[in-house]
Amino acid sequence: MYRGITIGTGHFAGIQLEAWSQVQGAEIVGLAGRNAVTTGALAEQFGIKRHGQDVIALIEELQPHFIDICTPPDSHLHYAQIAADRGIPVLCQKPVAPTQEESKRLVKYCKERGVPIMINENWRWQGWYREVKRILESGLLGKLFHVYFAMRPGDGYGPQPYPLQPYFKDMERFLLFETGVHWIDTYRMLFGEISSVFCDVRTWNPVCKGEDAAIVYFSFQSGMTGLYDANRVVYMEEVRSPAYGWMTLEGENGKLRLSQDGSIYVTLRGGQEYKHDYELPLGWKGGCAVATQQHFIDVLGQGGVFETDGDDYLISQEIVYACYESAQLKKMVGKWSIIEEAIEKAE
């Protein structure tokens, strides 16, 4: 049984702790947070006996097998260094750090000490995306032409937007940095590497500092194209639907449609649309938190490579920064420096 300590008591900590209660082969034995009252209440809710504000003291007492970092990005490097200095594997929430430079430093710090690090990017583990991946691997749609996703959570309107995470409105860079990276990573998982992007951004809600809408055009190395059309201000009857929006995927043999509730529909060339039946895992957003954390434990126990190890996730973040560069320059941007660096090292 792998014993872990979770650091952080914010909105998403509750989701992760609920998921840990369902992960096979692991348990959270300690919880650390800045606010003693909040930390104690959350620990009691999930039956965690040891909790406190001193991370190092908890580590020395409990001797955990892993550290689960679920705090704001500006503290990730600090906690990752504490874990890495003690040889403890790290599961770190995204984004890795506030800047790409600090993110690289964090990943390098763990690698140099031989400490496994996985970025907790759970979007790609949503049940509907794993099923779409299986459909694509079966060859049902044939050669892929184009993907379109309309992201419409409907939670960014009015004087008090984002009630679950009100700090969103104060972020200088918001939608792409905090949310869009989910789709960039998921697109890479489903369709392969992205070669270039063209991006345009808007801020529709005047109380928000950063962008709350963006349209990104992707060119993939395979030749297919994609669009990510995101707006958090547009009115939606259901706020924060399971899939946060809808997707259409077009291929040589037909097309696929993902609805807001995670249902998948397929239309093959010359045929009629039919619902693709599959078993959707229970839990938050198609069981993605459980699946992500189970993957982390499975790799720790059985060996292998994390799907979102530090190096791989740096690529997704690099593309986010390329989107901002494209929006500023009003032109297409490609050739991510981190990929070029990896190629040079391989040669």
Image: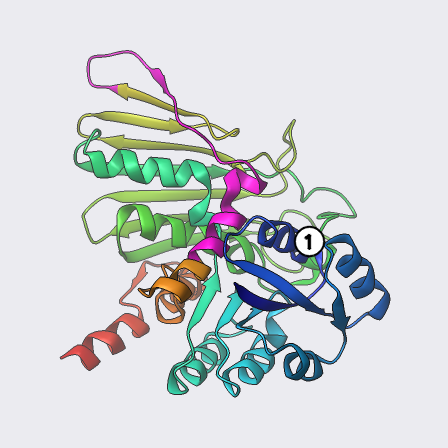
Residue 247, percent from left and from top: 41, 33
Q: Secondary structure at mark 1?
A: helix
Q: Is residue 50 above or below residue 110?
A: above
Q: Residue furthest left?
A: 347
Which stretch appears magenta?
268-295
Q: Closest to the observer: 121 or 26?
A: 26
Q: Amino acid at mark 1?
A: Gly
128 and 241: which one is in front?
128
Which residue is located at x 35 percent, y 63 percent? 302
Question: Is residue 321 found left or right of 137 in the rendered image?
Answer: right
Residue 87 image point, x, y percent: 48, 83
Task: Residue 215: tell me if it is visible.
Answer: no
Question: How many numbered callouts?
Answer: 1
Residue position for label 1: 14
The image shows residue 138 at horizontal and vertical percentages of 21, 34
- Which residue is rendered at x = 61% and y = 59% of the image? 210
Residue furthest front as drawn? 1
Q: Residue furthest right?
A: 37
One can see residue 11 in this view:
yes
User: Residue drawn 74% across and 80% down?
Assistant: 54
In the rendered view, tell whether residue 310 sits above or below residue 220. Answer: below
Within the magenta stretch, is there residue 270?
yes
15 vs 329: above or below: above
Q: Name the residue nearer the viewer: 41 or 209.
A: 41
Which residue is painted at 83% across and 70% down in the image? 36
